[in-house]
Image (cartoon, rainbow, N blue to C red):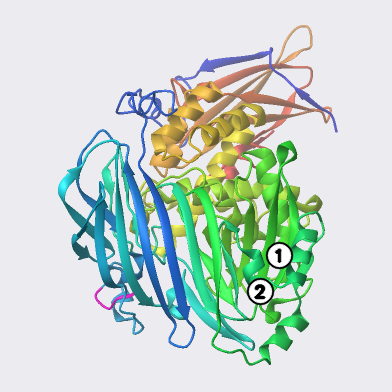
Amino acid sequence: MKYSILLLSVVFLSTHSIAQSTQSVYDPHDLFAQDFFTTNGNEFRSSNGAPGPLYWQNKADYNIKAAIDTVSNILTATETIYYTNNSPDSLPSLWLEIDQNTYKEDARSNFYTPGRGGKKVHSNGYAFKSISTEYKNKTSTADYIITDTRLQVRLTNALPPKQSIAIHISYQYTIPGAFGGRTDYYTTKNGKVYEIAQWYPRMCVYDDLNGWANLPFLGSGEFYCEYGNFDYTITVPQGIIVAGSGELVNEQDVLSSTQIKRLNAARASDKTIMIRTADEVNNDAQKTFNNKTFTWHFKMNNTRDVAFGASKAYMWDAAKVNLPGGKKCLAMSVYPVESAGNDAWGRATEYLKKSIEYFSEKWFVYPYPVTINEAGIAGGMEYPGIVFDGWHDKSDELYWVTAHEIGHNWFPMIVGSDERRYAWMDEGFNTFIDVYAADDFNNGEYAPKRDGEYAPGKGNPADEIVPLLKDSLAPSMMSRADMLTEKYRHPLVYFKPAFGLVLLREVVLGHDRFDYAFKKYTERWAYKHPSPDDFFRTMNNEAGEDLSWFWKEWFVNNWQLDIAVSDVSNKTGEDGSNTASIVINNLQKMAMPCTVELDLKDGSKQLIQLPVETWLQSSRFTLRVKTIQVVQSVIIDPKHELPDSNRDNNVWKE
C-alpha cells in the first residue's frame, strides 16, 4: 500500500457558505483569546518561565535523632530545624507541618470526604515534650499553637530577611498500623516491618506565590516542602535493618563484614547481588537478641524530605546504577521472604536500576548516592531516594509501580511543585515519563503502559479519555488536589495530564521540540518551586509556540474534540487531473492539529497535515486537493491519535 505526504497542492478555504448538518459549539475567539496569562513576569518569575533574577526560596536543614520501641510501636525523637529566611519579608511567625495529627479522631481529614468521619481507627498524633527557638545564641521556650496538622510558632521578634533561626523539638507518637496508609507497620512471619514517613515536624513552604503554604493535610493532596540538608539517626533493636533516604554513613557500626563486602561488590555490579539472603533472614528470626540497640546514621543533602523502612524481616539486594557522565549510584531493595521470587521482588532492583538509568539519560541525572525499593503495605508511595511499594506486587504490576514511584524523584522531589494545590504537576508529569520508560525497559517487556494510572482499560488512551471529556460534572485539572473525589482523582491527576503531554509530544510539537522544552523546564526548576504558569511559559518559549489554546482546552477546562468530514466532491479537469473539495467541521470546543488521509481510486493514499491554525478563524474549512485519481474515501485521524468524541463522522466514503 502506497503512502505519500501531500503539502503543496492543498488550498485551505473558509467555507461559511457550506451548511453544517450538526451545529458547532466551537468558538475560535474563546479558544485563541489573548487572555490566558493574567499576570506579567516579574523579578521573581520571568515571563519566559524561568526563575527571575531575584528568585528566592527559604531553606530548612534538619538534624534528627529518633528511636523506635518495637514493643509499644512508639517513635521518640529530638529534632533541630535550622531555618533560613531568604525572602524579602520579615516573618512574625513560622508554620510547620505535623502530619501525624491527621490520624487523630477530631482531625479535619476524617470529615472532608463523605463517610470518613466514621472510621474507627485513630492515633493520638504528636505528643510534644518541648519546643524552643534559638536566635543569635539565645534560646527561649516557643510560643506555639496547634491547628489540626499545622503548628505555628509565634516569634517574639520577627525573623528578618537573610537571617536564620533554630527550632528545637522533642516529641513522640504511636506509629499507625495498617490504617496509616502512607506510614505504617505490618507483620510478617519473621517480624514487623515499619514504613516510616511524615515522621518529623517539617517547615511549611513560604514563597512568593501565596506566602505560607499551610493548607492542612487531608490525605489526598500530598506535599510541598522546602529543600535543605538532612542528618538523621535511627536507633533500633539489634537485628533490625534500616533502609533510609540518603547515604548510610556508619556501615562499619551496623553491618557485618560479610554485608559490607557484598555491598561493595554490588556497587560494581550491573547484576543484582544479595546482601542478606532468605536463609539468613530465616535463621536470624530464630535467634534471641539481648537488649542491645544499634544506631543507623544517614545523611542526605539538597532534598525536601526523608523517609525510611525498618525490619528484621528484610531480605536485601543491590546493584550498580550507571548514570550519564560516568557517574554511578546504588540501587537496592528490601523485602520480606514472602515477597521473594524472580516473578516478584527478586527483580525489584532491576526495575529500579533501569528506571533510574532511563530517566537520568532522558530528562535529568539522578542526584543522590542511593535509591531504595521497600516492600510493604503502603502499596505505592514516594519519597526522596526511597519508595514504598506493595509487598505482594509481581511482574508488570511491580515494574509499573516501581517505575512510577521512583519517577517521583524527578517530579516532585527534584522539581518541587506544590502537590497539595496542583497534583497533576507531579502525578501527571511522572505518569507521562513512565509511558516512555515502559517502552524502553527490556525491549518493551511490559509495554505499552496500561495500568490504573494510564489507559486503565488497556486500550487506546485517545479513546479511553473520551468519557472523561464528555462528563459535564468533571472538574478542572487545576482544582485543588483535595477537591477531587475518588471518581475523578486518577483520571484527572494521572491519566489526563499525562496523555496531554503525549499529545503535545506526538501530535503538536514533535519529539525534538517537546523534549528540548520539557528538559529546560526540569533543569530550570530543579530544587525550586514552580507554578503551573512557570511550566506553561517555559513550554511556550522553549518550544517556540504559543500553546495557550492547548493549556486552556486541556488543563484549565475539560473540553471535547469532534472533527468531522461534512462533504467531499471530486471534479475532473480537462487534463484528466482531479480536484477534491473536502469540507471539514470542528463541532466541539477543542481544536487540535490533525491528519487527513485520502484513499484514491488506484489504492494509493495521501496524507495531509492540518495545523491548529486551521481553526483560528472558523469552525469550517474546505480543503481543495489536486490528486491524480478520484478520492474514494477520507479519514480524519487515521491512527486514532486524537481524543475525538465521535469517530463515526471522521470517515467519508464514496
Residue type at numbered disc 2: Tyr
Q: Quadrant of residue 543?
A: top right
Q: Examine the rendered structure and indicate whether residue 324 appears above or below residue 573.
A: below
Is 380 left or right of 471, judged from the image as shown? right
Q: Position of residue 578 (x, y in %)?
A: 73, 16
What type is the residue that disc 1 sits on? Ala
Label 1 or label 2, whichever comes before in sequence order: 2
Report x, y in % for residue 393. Answer: 65, 71
**327, 470: nearer the viewer:** 327
Q: Residue at x 56, y 46 (%)?
A: 410
* Residue 18 percent coordinates (x, y): 48, 23
Residue denoted by label 2: 335
The residue where tag 1 is placed is 348
Name the residue: 60% across, 31% down. Answer: 514
**In front of the other: 452 or 404:** 404
Q: Which numbered marker is on residue 82?
A: none
Depth check, mark 1 against mark 2: the one in front is 2
Identified at 48% across, 28% down, the residue is: 538
**Extent of the magenta region:** 102-106
Label 2 CA crowd tier, 10 Å (few <14, some 14–19, many 20+): many
Q: Residue furthest top?
A: 574
Circles 1 and 2 in contact, beta carbons < 8 Å = yes
Above or below — where is 45 with respect to 6?
below
Q: Is residue 165 left or right of residue 326?
A: left
Q: Is residue 186 visible?
A: yes
